[in-house]
Image (tube, grey):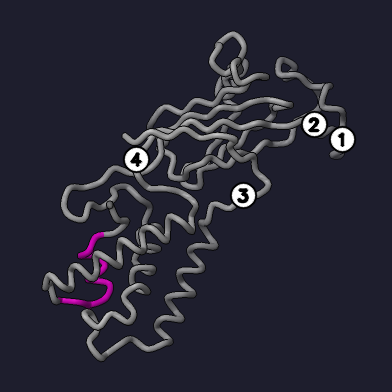
Amino acid sequence: MAVLQSVDALRERLGFTDSKEVVINALERALNEATVVVGDHLRTGFDRQTNVDLFYVPKTREIGPANRGRPSSRVTWSNLESPYTVAQTRFALSQGFVDSGQTITAYAASTVEGLADSDLRYDLKDVSGRNLVTFDYDEGVMIVDDFLLNVSYVQVSYTSGFTTTGGDPEVYVGQPNWLKTMCEVRAHMATFGNRVLYDDLQPGPDVLSILRYDYSALVDGHARYYPSYMQPMTTTSTAI
């Protein structure tokens, strides 16, 4: 499996100069464990893949002046000149780390079948010449503005994850620095109690407490937890 940080970077962090095979293997195991745990905590994978997420948006309400609710039927997809604006609709994609350099499509239709028909669907990135979609690429969040998604199906197609280097183990390329740090901290925690690395000179409990605090702060700042956002009904992913 690929890892989020290199063995050399972890060895430098820990201050190890020993390059014996048994030490390198121990560090690799720590990085493997850290990469899996970080992915679980962030609720995303890191491998390069294409994804098609299908969402269902139930009946919504538009927001009128002074935030007074108005019947959603007052606004239709073609009625973008309404004096009322529609609250944002937020979608939690199945994966984070969306590749902004690859094609992303976002379609809406009243039926699942309509998503495949250009005459029945709306391209949310080009509604009457307006792009109504914004993304937080790392977090894997899509926001639709000023468009009533009322009893609608929404399909988002995108590429996520990172390419890898050669070598053993392979290391992901292009991940943000905070993600590398997160992996390093978790891998450092995983080395505690390993006599191959530390012999009888184990780091003190204060060191582990600091690492746990640092790691928790990183999780809190980046975990993909959006219970109030639209969640995918189905997801189809293909490795590339």
Task: Determine whether the residue tagged by mark 2 lies in a helix, strand or loop.
Answer: strand
Residue 222 is covered by the magenta coloring: no
Distance (Cα) linking label 4 and label 3: 23 Å
Question: Marks 2 and 1: CB-CB under 8 Å?
Answer: yes
Which of marks 3 and 1 precedes in the sequence? 1
Q: Amino acid at mark 1?
A: Gly
Which of marks 3 and 4 precedes in the sequence? 4
Question: Marks 4 and 1: CB-CB under 8 Å?
Answer: no
What residue is shown with label 4?
Answer: 48
What residue is shown with label 2?
Answer: 62
Q: Which residues are magenta?
A: 6-17
Residue 12 is covered by the magenta coloring: yes
Please name the predominant secondary structure of the magenta segment in the image: helix
Residue 63 quadrant: top right
Q: Nearer the viewer, residue 32 or 146?
A: 32
Disc 3 versus disc 2: nearer the observer: 3
Question: Marks 4 and 3: CB-CB under 8 Å?
Answer: no
What residue is shown with label 1?
Answer: 69
Residue 4, percent from left and from top: 32, 56
Q: Is residue 148 visible?
A: no
Which of marks 2 and 3 precedes in the sequence? 2
